[in-house]
Image (cartoon, rainbow, N blue to C red):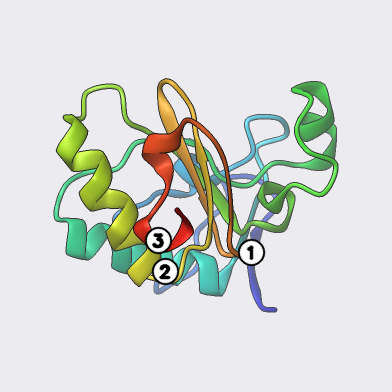
Amino acid sequence: MTMLKMDHYTDPKPDPWPWPNFSPYELASNGDGSVQIDNEAGDKLQSLRTEWGKPLTLNSAYRDPIYNTSINGAKLSKHMLGQAFDISVRSWLKIDKQEFKELAWRHGFRGFGGYDSFIHIDIGRARKWGKSWAWPKVLK
């Protein structure tokens, strides 16, 4: 597993920056501001965004362990490995959610969590939890 690591999102970013639709700030932990994104996950997120063709609002990407604990995140959260993203769906129409989850599956995301205002996607094993709108057909 290779990672893009930055001590803080305000540090100079690598050149070239691999994910043009996402800034270090968007990918950083809401705790200490560090960035640790698994390159495979970041590449999949970027390819998903490119094909989706619409902006994605990230609520959470990397989480440092102290921050993850403070919000009662899963002890083995994929966020702490830089392999998970929570994406806001507040303004989406129902059909957009279905299209998005199917597209995310095609781009290699296998973990899906459905919540009222966001969807969790990660590159871990195939699994699902939460609101049922978040399940790709292959997980039903």
The image quadrant that residue 5 belongs to is: bottom right
Q: Residue furthest front?
A: 140
Amino acid at circle 2:
Lys
Q: Which residue is mark 1?
A: 124
45 up-or-down from 7: above or below = below
Return the x and y of residue 10 as percentages of the image width and height.
55, 43
Q: For this rendering, which residue is in front, 59 or 140?
A: 140
Q: Which element carries disc 3, helix, strand or loop?
A: helix
Q: Which residue is mark 2?
A: 44
Report whether residue 58 is seen.
no
Label 2 sits on a secondary structure element that is helix
Which residue is at the front of the view, 56 or 137? 137
- Give the crowd class for mark 3: few <14, some 14-19, many >=20 residues within 10 Å: many
Residue at 46% from the left image edge and 41% from the top image edge: 26
**Amino acid under label 1?**
Gly
Do callouts 3 and 2 mark residues in contact (Cβ within 8 Å)?
Answer: yes
Q: Earlier in the sequence, mark 2 or mark 1?
A: 2
What residue lies at 48% left-to-right and 27% top-to-bottom? 115
- Percent from the top left, x then y, of residue 105? 39, 64
Instruction: Tell me what residue is drawn at x 27 percent, y 57 percent.
Output: 49
Horizontal arrangement in the rendering, residue 109 relative to residue 19 (left or right):
right
From the viewer's perspective, is residue 135 above or below residue 32? below
